[in-house]
Image (cartoon, rainbow, N blue to C red):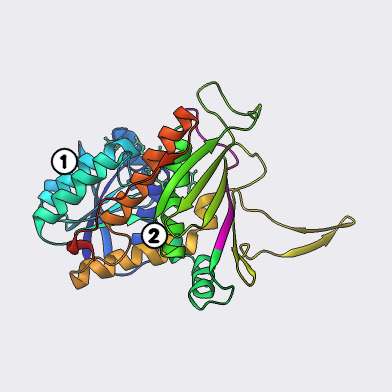
Amino acid sequence: MTIRIGVIGTGAIGADHARRINQTLTGGKVVAVTDVNREQAEAVVDRLQLDAKVYDNGHDLIAAADVDAVLVTSWGPTHEEFVVAAIKAGKYVFCEKPLATTAQGCFNIVEAEQAAGKRLVQVGFMRPYDSGYRQLKACIDAGDIGEPLMIHAAHRNPTVPERYITEMAIHDTLIHELDVFRWLLNDDYKSAQVIFPRKTRYTHSQLADPQIVLLETVKGTRIDVEVFVNCQYGYDIQCSVVGEEGIANLPEPQSLLMRKGAKLSNEILMDWKDRFIAAYDVELQDFLDGCNAGQMRGASSWDGLAAAVAADACVKAQQTGQIEAIEMPPRPAFYA
Ligand SMILES: NC(=O)c1ccc[n+]([C@@H]2O[C@H](COP(=O)([O-])OP(=O)(O)OC[C@H]3O[C@@H](n4cnc5c(N)ncnc54)[C@H](O)[C@@H]3O)[C@@H](O)[C@H]2O)c1
Ligand SMILES: O[C@H]1[C@H](O)[C@@H](O)[C@H](O)[C@@H](O)[C@H]1O
């Protein structure tokens, strides 16, 4: 069966997901779109030659009888409202990260989903679908480096838009690490601290950049993550897991090794769209297959909540400069 999809938010990733659903993946078709910037939604329909109706707002799109499932790809602070509405309409919903920008927002979603009595939500955490992270996890799970003791990581963007401010380094950027480390280590977080080095001259007054986030897990693994979103030189994701018997590094994306002009060089990608292109494909195919099978399989609302609980503590730590506790509520059997 072809799942008829409605897309809320046709910006960078909304348009990219619409493209992959219609041109790359199987089992889905975009039939509806909406964006507060209607002209942009219309332009995306034209550019991708979608056979899709442009709705005035997300709620009308969710209510449409010919929309089977919804993609929420609007700005983070709008996610909760649309995800809860989709759940209440009994529709499967793929929500880009963050599930909500606060833990309370995620709680509201978790409660709505439990009231619906069925998992309806997949969160857009794509790194567990990335082949490099999968290799890293297989290595850790096989015990190849012994117990993981430390992770050194970096999340670097070349630039970010002007509306990106200090706390977005946590709930818009670090949120990927907050999800993927739980999955990699099969562990939860215990505490967080944020350290601010001197600011790059490429940032603005509302954004402290870079930042270093220090995390401790329940099992005692220590993690340091550099978040640097105006690094200029590339989109660079690093992850090095230090174990008792060895170190496992996230593989670099494949690229040509060039010998030219007395230099040996590899290209560094500039865009998240290219860095994780294969992972987004597999992730969204899993969502379409899940809709068809009547069972969501990717990151759950609970995973979205777990990342948001840690993110709230990191945002607090940005403000207090202290080590802040991260306390996860008990996991309901619904999300076992
Ligand atoms: N998984 C990933 O790697 C990844 C990559 C990029 C973005 N994202 C996430 O996707 C979301 C969108 O990011 P983006 O980079 O595409 O941003 P963007 O600014 O390019 O696009 C967002 C779009 O949402 C629209 N919008 C905002 N509020 C709306 C509302 N109430 N109703 C309808 N449309 C609305 C905006 O007009 C804009 O066109 C964010 O939550 C972001 O964190 C995830
Ligand atoms: O929304 C984007 C996206 O999630 C990217 O993967 C991340 O690297 C950026 O920092 C973030 O702003």
Q: Which one is closest to the eye, mark 1 or mark 2?
A: 1
Q: Mark 2 Cα within 10 Å, few/some/many (few <14, many 20+)?
A: some
Q: Position of residue 46 (x, y in %)?
A: 35, 46
Residue drawn at x 30%, y 49% is: 305
Quarter of the rendering containing residue 3 = bottom left
Q: Is residue 222 left or right of residue 102?
A: right
Q: Position of residue 167 (x, y in %)?
A: 44, 33
**Element on which disc 1 rests:** helix
Name the one closer to the observer, 277 or 142.
142
Disc 1 to disc 2, how far (Cα)? 24 Å
**Element on which disc 2 rests:** helix
Question: Which mark, by number, is residue 315?
Answer: none
Q: Is residue 71 left or right of residue 323?
A: left
Q: Which amino acid type is shown beneath numbered disc 2?
A: Arg
Name the one closer to the observer, 273 or 238.
238
Name, please, the residue furthest toward the right.
Answer: 262
Question: Which mark, by number, is residue 59?
Answer: 1
Name the one closer to the observer, 25 or 125.
125
Residue drawn at x 17%, y 62% is: 334
Q: Which amino acid type is shown beneath numbered disc 1?
A: His
Q: Which residue is mark 2?
A: 20
Name, please, the residue furthest toward the top.
Answer: 205
Residue 203 vs 215, above or below: the answer is: above
Magenta stretch in the rendered image: 149-165
